[in-house]
Image (spheres, helix red, strand yellow):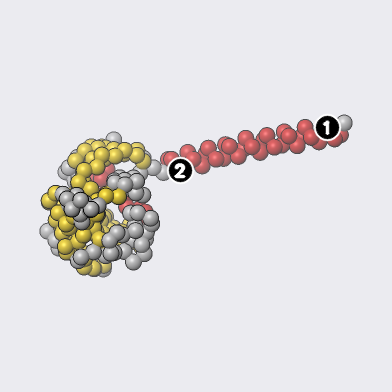
Amino acid sequence: MKHRRFIVGWKVRQIVLTVLGIVALTHARVVVAADKLPFHAKGMYVEGCSCSAPCTCQLTGIEPMCQGVNAIVLTGGQYKGVELAGAKIAFATAAGKWVRLYVDARDPKQHDAAVAFARAYAKDFGKIEDVEDAKVEVAGKDGRYTLTVNDGAIMSLTTEPVLGGDGKTPLVYSNIHDTLHPTIKQGKTVGGSYNDGGHAFQLKDSNAYFQDAFNTKGNL
């Protein structure tokens, strides 16, 4: 009889522990989900960095020697319930170490949403040192882009595409580790520079990535 009570008690204990484990796991998932917000974003992006092509940061993981600049021009979408069309975001980074963000928005409400969006997107590239309001301009198409921040005083970048085997279209990488633009195209830097916040570097004949048009949804 005692043996039977022991078995019953052991089974009850195992059931309780299992239920508690499920509750804890569910709570952990809710906490993780609460850290991110849903987004919808349409636009284009271009980046250039100091690595030889292809840079691993977007493909397999952060390259600790990588320094680069990046710009996103938003033509649609929402974050925190605010329309993002017209906002432009740029950032410079030493991958895994620091990030400096630059935001160009049409009004205070969009500015705050764009800053939150930029912080959420860029945080995996390193510690965010500063966020500044700036004039961000991107011109060009088909991988031939020119990026400037404050007319080039802070940041500049010129890129061209790297063509694939057909000699007509750029190399393409899909299913990469990037929520915003999971498909990117290969380019190269023609030239570039960054100088702000005590950081400075030059770019030439190195890796560049771009996406002429993305339209994505997810959580950041």
Q: Secondary structure at mark 2?
A: helix
Q: Residue at x 71, y 37 (%)?
A: 13
Tell me the quarter of the picture where residue 108 sits: top left
Question: Can residue 117 be seen in this snapshot?
Answer: no
Q: Is residue 141 left or right of residue 173?
A: left
Mark 2 neighbour density, 10 Å: few (under 14) some (14–19) many (20 or more): few
Compared to residue 154, the image places residue 219 above or below, namely above
* Image coordinates for residue 201, horizontal then vertical, percent: 23, 68
According to the image, label 2 marks what residue? 32
Q: Secondary structure at mark 1?
A: helix
Tell me the quarter of the picture where residue 208 sits: bottom left
Q: Label 1 vs label 2: CA separation?
A: 42 Å
Q: Residue at x 23, y 53 (%)?
A: 165
The residue mark sitting in front, 1 or 2, is 1
Q: Residue at x 38, y 57 (%)?
A: 61
State the mark number for residue 102: none
The amino acid pointed to by label 2 is: Val
State the mark number for residue 4: 1
Please tell me which residue lies in front, 45 or 24.
45
Q: Residue at x 85, y 35 (%)?
A: 3
The C terminus: image quadrant? top left
* Image coordinates for residue 114, horizontal then vertical, percent: 25, 45
The amino acid pointed to by label 1 is: Arg
* Image coordinates for residue 150, horizontal then vertical, percent: 14, 58
